[in-house]
């Protein structure tokens, strides 16, 4: 044990970096132009991301469709290789690990997707679905214990273990998402990456599934990367929020700071569309309607990528990409903007 860990420290030490992105870049070669002969375009899906997920906490990731959220999660899970940059898990470079160690580390990070219906095999029973990861990673648990662990998981996510022999289509949408969560938990991961996990559900069911995520986090000390386009949902679950625009994080900070005093114009615009529970708060500033769609990630604007839609844009925004401010003294927050609020 390192010298600086006091004896009697809790087993799950919250707040220490668990998963880190350092200068992550992912550029895709797109299909190119018809009739050939022209250079193929490069899609700058993720374009220089630094992020930290702290142990036992939830990092919310928000941004419009196509800004690179899912690409970033694939990089964090080592399902895809970055063009450049590194992913550190507990301080170790994920992609530099020997393959056996990488396999073990991959078990620690599991994915919960938006619509489990398309990802769950319709021919399998609930029990088989939850048990399958253990049958693949055979060394983790003796065969005779797997079924009882799968039953336990079904119970933990609020499904009736008596329904273990049902097939996915015999469950409701919310129940299928619970099944997806049970499967993701089968290998006892430390991190769940949740990519729009409640977007396909009715609002009342969303609240139940969000509560389940919170209960599981408390019980198992789990850490979450939680992606949602709905900022009201993220407000319920996240400790920290990162706002992404065209492959970059434009603002990142603790939830209350970002929600109550957004500093980046883009964050302000996104939040202005969310109903404000506090009438004295931001709602008074009125709705900001962004003009147009985000630019194409094959040709991101020069300077600050948001300048083409920003009402504060000046010459420097066209010319120079803003660097993240140092973490502010009030709250924990970084913003990449030449003219931030506050
Ligand atoms: N395999 C790929 N090849 C080429 N381009 C890709 C690939 N995967 C993603 N992209 C492009 O990268 C950009 C970011 O996509 P990504 O799926 O990460 O966005 P997203 O933020 O998850 O969007 P959504 O909210 O719609 O899920 C998009 O322009 C997308 O078309
Ligand atoms: Mg996505």
Image: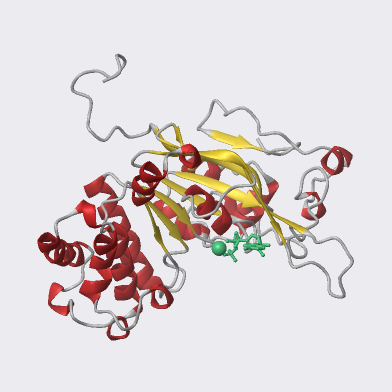
What is the total number of numbered labels drawn onto the structure image? 0
Q: Residue at x 85, y 44 (%)?
A: 318
Q: Residue 264: in sight, yes or no?
A: yes
Q: Residue at x 31, y 47 (%)?
A: 222
Residue 64 screen position, x and y as percent: 63, 61
In depth, the one of 339 and 282 nearer the eye is 339
Residue 305 screen position, x and y as percent: 76, 49
Which residue in the rendered view is the most extreme toward the top? 3
| Image quarter of residue 269 | bottom right
Q: Is residue 235 left or right of residue 168?
A: right
Q: How is the image coloured?
A: secondary structure
Q: Residue at x 34, y 46 (%)?
A: 104
Q: Can you say which quadrant of the picture contains the N terminus?
A: top left
Q: Quadrant of ligand 2?
A: bottom right
| Image quarter of residue 49 | top right
The vertical placement of 324 against 240, above or below, is above
Q: Is residue 153 left or right of residue 269?
A: left
Residue 248 screen position, x and y as percent: 65, 47
Q: Can you say which quadrant of the picture contains the C terminus?
A: top right
The vertical placement of 302 against 88, above or below, is below
In depth, the one of 31 and 213 nearer the eye is 31
Residue 335 screen position, x and y as percent: 64, 37
Q: Residue 50: in sight, yes or no?
A: no
């Amino acid at each position: 044990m390192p010298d600086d860990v006091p004896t009697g420290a809790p087993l799950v030490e919250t707040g220490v970096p668990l998963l880190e992105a350092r200068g992550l870049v992912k550029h895709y070669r797109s299909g190119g132009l018809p009739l050939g002969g022209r250079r193929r375009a490069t899609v700058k899906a993720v374009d220089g991301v630094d992020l930290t997920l702290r142990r036992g906490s939830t990092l919310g990731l928000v941004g419009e469709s196509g800004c690179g959220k899912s690409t970033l999660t694939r990089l964090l899970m080592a399902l895809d290789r970055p063009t450049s940059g590194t992913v550190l898990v507990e301080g170790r470079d994920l992609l530099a690990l020997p393959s056996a160690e990488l396999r073990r580390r991959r078990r620690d990070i599991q994915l919960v997707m938006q619509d489990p219906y398309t990802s769950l095999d319709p021919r399998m029973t609930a029990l088989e679905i939850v048990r399958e990861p253990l049958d693949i990673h055979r060394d983790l648990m003796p065969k005779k214990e797997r079924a009882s662990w799968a039953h336990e998981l079904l119970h933990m996510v609020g499904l009736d273990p008596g329904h273990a022999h049902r097939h996915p289509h015999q469950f409701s949408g919310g129940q299928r998402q619970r099944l997806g969560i049970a499967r993701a938990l089968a290998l006892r991961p430390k991190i769940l990456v949740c990519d729009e996990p409640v977007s396909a559900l009715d609002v009342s069911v969303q609240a139940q599934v969000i509560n389940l995520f919170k209960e599981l986090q408390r019980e198992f000390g789990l850490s979450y990367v939680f992606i949602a386009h709905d900022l009201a949902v993220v407000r319920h679950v996240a400790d920290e929020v990162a706002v992404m625009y065209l492959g970059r994080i434009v603002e990142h900070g603790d939830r209350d700071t970002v929600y109550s005093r957004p500093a980046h114009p883009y964050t302000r615009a996104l939040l202005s569309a969310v109903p404000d529970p506090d009438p004295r708060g931001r709602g008074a500033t009125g709705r900001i309607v962004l003009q147009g769609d985000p630019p194409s990630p094959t040709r991101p604007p020069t300077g600050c990528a948001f300048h083409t839609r920003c009402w504060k844009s000046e010459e420097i925004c066209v010319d120079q990409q803003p660097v993240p401010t140092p973490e502010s003294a009030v709250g924990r927050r970084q913003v990449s903007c030449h003219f931030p609020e506050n």
